Amino acid sequence: MTWAGSLIDVQKFSDGGPDLYIRVAHSELSDKQYWKAVTAAIVVVAFISILLCAHFMRKLFLKFRGETDAGCSEERTAKHNMHGVKLEALPLFKFGMISNATKKFDTTNKLGQGGFGPVFKGKLPNGQEIAVKRLARSSNQGLEEFMNEVEVISRLQHRNLVRLLGCCVEHEEKMLVYEYMPNGSLDSYLFDSRKQLLLDWQTRIVVIEGICRGLLYLHRDSRLRIIHRDLKASNILLDEELNPKISDFGMARIFCCKEDQANTTRVVGTYGYMPPEYALRGIFSEKSDVYSFGVLLLEILSGRRNTSFYHEDQQLFLIAYAWKLWNEDKIMNLVDPIIYDPRMEPDVVRYANVGLLCVQEAAADRPNTKTVLSMLSSEIVDLPRPKQPPFTAVQMSSSESECSQMSPNNSRAHSGIPVSAGSNPTLRRRRGRILLVSSLLHIRLTMDEFLALA
């Protein structure tokens, strides 16, 4: 049907009626299609522009925080799981960023080497300095320490613990990223004749009490109960103000809420800092760290390393020498000559007393960390007298050792363990194990002296 009239009153019916076709000019039809295309193009361009703006704003925001897309991915889920260790609530750095920060792991940025692998210094785009522990690919021990350290320290935060910033798990690379400690480790100051001058008595007090507070947090005040198991001077880092921070949690062990001690057949740690129950029977607890802290306290007082200390006149290790001076009321002779001042005597006596209480042979005799801190801060005025420490058998010469073992009147050997003249095989085996460990320490001491001379 062709309609040539007006369209004003035309109505559309849903059913029935003829179809009505309308002829319009070709130019009018083309204009409508054109504007539809223009509108669609504008919408698409606007959408893409919004996406690009959002992308660049995100990059700018990340750059301001010192991160890039090639740098750090804030994944806070258990996406990565290695043998049951979940990287929860831990920023994941990309390998490219770590490589750039350390100048492709240049040897000039290498800070040290351990069982875990090498440690490098780096700098993030925002200027923050970092320390990167890179797992050696051939190190099975390092892999175990890596997983253990992530599990432990990622849940901890305290002013006297080194802070873990994140990690990198990419392809075969596994790295831990820490805050950088500009003054390095405590041993680099304590046992260096030039740097020792920077550790005056007040600074050493701050270091001792700071380490104790960090231990108290691990043992009692954190969400977890953690035994460090490798507390020593090289694992204490110093910030720009020489405040101590406990580091290296690769050997640490998490205790359940009701667990007080544990046993292991694989003894880890450093000889000279191990208590006898751990070195000989694999038993460790909070009191194991207390023993290590006591050794460290005596090292800080004396400025001498326990494992390489050798008194000129007698065969005495540091702990045995401190014990000898204590019994002779000459404990001031233990003090590092660089910081010696007669006015220090009341503090030195107190700190030496606490140190010797911490290294007593029986774990039950040692104070817990909370009590140690109270003793150091003078909250406990009257301190108990310490009992003889273990591992002092090496103070005897070989002839003296033979005489003491043969003498029926000698009721206690220099190791501090009862060794009556009876034929008790358990006591003989126990004494033999003590002497063996002490002999190993003596061999290590001799090797240290040889290397120093070389």
Image: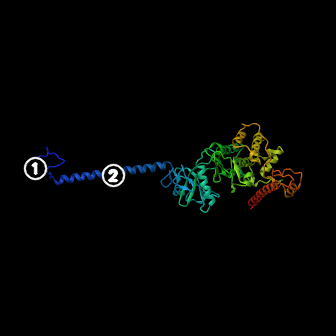
Q: Is residue 416 left or right of residue 143?
A: right
Q: Amino acid at mark 2?
A: Val
Give the label on residue 223, or none.
Answer: none
Q: Residue at x 86, y 50 (%)?
A: 411
Query: For mark 1, what is the residue?
Result: 4
Location of residue 329 by image quarter: top right
Q: Horizontal and vertical percent for residue 350?
A: 76, 41
- Name the residue nearer the viewer: 272 or 50: 272
Depth check, mark 1 against mark 2: the one in front is 1
Q: Residue at x 84, y 52 (%)?
A: 419
Estimate how packed mark 2 is, as few (under 14), some (14 to 19) or many (20 or more) residues with alpha carbons within 10 Å.
few
Give the label on residue 45, or none.
Answer: 2
- Ranked by sequence position, the earlier of labels 1 and 2 is 1
- Name the residue nearer the viewer: 429 or 287: 429
Q: Amino acid at mark 1?
A: Ala
Location of residue 98 by image quarter: bottom right
Colour style of the rendered protein structure: rainbow
| Quadrant position of the C terminus in the picture | bottom right
- Residue with the most extreme bottom position: 138
